[in-house]
Amino acid sequence: MNNWLVSSGDNKEIVISSRIRLARNIKNLYFPHKLNEEEGRDLINVVEDAIYTSSEREENYRTYYLWKNDILDNYIYLDKHLVSNKLISNYKKAGFILNNEETISIMINEEDHLRIQCIVEGLNLEEAYEEANKIDDLLEEKLSYAYSEQLGYITACPTNIGTGLRASVMIHLPALSMNNEMNGVLNALTQVGMTIRGLYGEGSKSSGNMYQISNQITLGLNEKEILDNLKGVVNHIITQEKMARDKLLSVYEYELKDRIFRAYGTLKSAYIMSSSECLSLLSNVRFGVELGIITDIDKHILNNLIVDTQPSMMEKIFNKKILHKENGVYRAELIRERLNK
Amino acid sequence: MNNWLVSSGDNKEIVISSRIRLARNIKNLYFPHKLNEEEGRDLINVVEDAIYTSSEREENYRTYYLWKNDILDNYIYLDKHLVSNKLISNYKKAGFILNNEETISIMINEEDHLRIQCIVEGLNLEEAYEEANKIDDLLEEKLSYAYSEQLGYITACPTNIGTGLRASVMIHLPALSMNNEMNGVLNALTQVGMTIRGLYGEGSKSSGNMYQISNQITLGLNEKEILDNLKGVVNHIITQEKMARDKLLSVYEYELKDRIFRAYGTLKSAYIMSSSECLSLLSNVRFGVELGIITDIDKHILNNLIVDTQPSMMEKIFNKKILHKENGVYRAELIRERLNK
């Protein structure tokens, strides 16, 4: 299981990462929004008791209590997609348990008591599901889940009821975007019960041609069917994207090279850069890497830049408070350093 | 006397080149537009006899007969500012005599019988005038000029009558342009009898923040007064430009660096580039060199790119016919090669 930020992976890969999230709740306990601080923190201890049952897991996992954490650190885990905004807003009673590789995160007292999440690089839904499932089994040995024979897992929001499973894939679709074919893709996805969103989750608009595709339906299908459906849809989109790429390459070779190398040159040269320009240029460079046109940079450097150019992460990296208006200058500096190595 | 395309000169210099042009006509001979081919070509021979009177000049000068020249070559000399469009349109009876350094060009049968031109780098109007004057004296020994005691030198167009002197300076004004102060400069210049034009002469709009400032009045002032007036005006504009630069540097240091290095990065990376974008980016890079922010490139490389990225020059350099739609691709290739050295 490889972390999408660390592994160099396959540079030709269109799918950046696969994510599995299982929503679970404890029987006879109020949903998190009704829990007070003490009850919330007690639940974290209960979950810890269920996880840290072997010395191996004690070494590989660590608990983060949001109320003890530096606020900055909480936002850094958000930037890395390891916690959610909702978890942070519950910070007085919320925590998460993370493995060392940062591929598995168990959020406690998000919208549901438990959100077991596994993110891996590439299109690897089954592996991610298997890992999340192992944690789920482990927890179920010690905890009594809220479960109905008829409905399945009970969740705080009815959209998650049933399997409690949200499977999603982060995919890079520059050619479909350039060819203005994304609206068609979007409509088709909605019709087969899938959701498509931008890079940073619900409601966020697409930045840098990165899209999160996930199942909308959690009820009435079993886990395998959900994963198979999503995989089928994603493979179909990959085929469309590849066709769009071939078309671009055959008809607009120079325009494409121009766009890709200008983006690379600008990233290496700029002294001020906004977040949205950064994502858009990184997308063009990534496209160049995926096409084999740019060969002197590895994709994991680009993945890291997506995360590291977020304001909280930059404060961590530069080890100083950065004013909002200075973000562009520090972002540009960070990018120049990484790409001119 | 240094050719502006060859010498590395002073990188801090705001004035790129100084140009002197003397318009002269032969007594009792129709103006060029009334001459037939034979009469026109005869005049070229007469001028040659006046020039090639020493072995030194025979070695240093060469005559180009436009009707014998390859059309492409004629346009290349146009790109280098050594001949005019008018001369080329008279190609069947026109020629020019050029020195090896390409600083002196004597056009024969342009609008007037003789246009003695001298271009040198930097703000060096006196030296340029001295050189042009030497050629003028030399020609006057053998030729009878059309001259009136009352009016001075007679010219085909009344705007040149009197001294027949047009002095001009090519100046780079990025800071005044960025600060939107060019309109004020332009109005002030017109009021003191000066003309301001873009990079490629009459009617051409300014490209790359390059402006040609020249005297409008040729009558009623002597040569020294004309040169002193122009020099005074140019020095005043230089002061304004320097103030605008200081202002930009103190208030918008990062924005300026950003603009300059993005331009440099884009020039080094692009695969398609239009002429106007090229001039605009070269201006930004030149600005960086003039400010001492960019130190790894010499200004004469930028000067050469201005000329060498013109369509005719590119056909010469790549030694092939280039279609109009391919210009952007070859231009980008040429620029990448020169700047990535």
Image (cartoon, coloured by chain):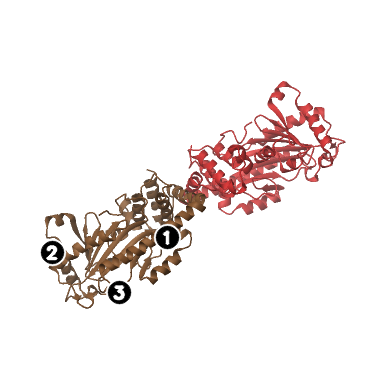
Chain colours: A red, B brown
Residue B86 visible, this orientation: no
Indicate the amino acid at tag 1.
Answer: Gln
Q: Distance between the residues labelled 3 and 1?
A: 29 Å
Q: Which mark is residue B49?
A: 2
Answer with mark 3 or mark 2, whichever residue precedes in sequence.
2
Callout 3: few (<14), some (14-19), or many (20+) C-alpha neighbours within 10 Å?
few
SS of the residue at dot 2? Answer: helix
Which residue is the extreme one toward the bottom?
Answer: B150
Tags 3 and 1 on a common chain:
yes
* Mark 2 Cα-neighbour bin, 10 Å: few <14, some 14–19, many ≥20: few
Q: Examine the rendering and report whether any part of residue B140 can be seen.
A: yes
Judge depth for marks 3 and 2 and give the one in front: 3
- Relative to residue A92, is residue A299 drawn left or right? left
The amino acid pointed to by label 2 is Asp
Task: For marks 3 and 2, give the CA distance.
Answer: 29 Å
Numbered disc 1: what chain? B
| Spot occupied by residue A125 in the image (x, y as percentages of width and height) | 67, 36
Quadrant in the rendering for residue A231 = top right
Q: Residue at x 86, y 35 (%)?
A: A27
Q: Name the residue under label 3.
A: B159
Of mark 1 and mark 2, the one earlier in the sequence is 2
Q: Name the residue under label 1.
A: B240
CA gap, disc 1 and disc 2:
47 Å
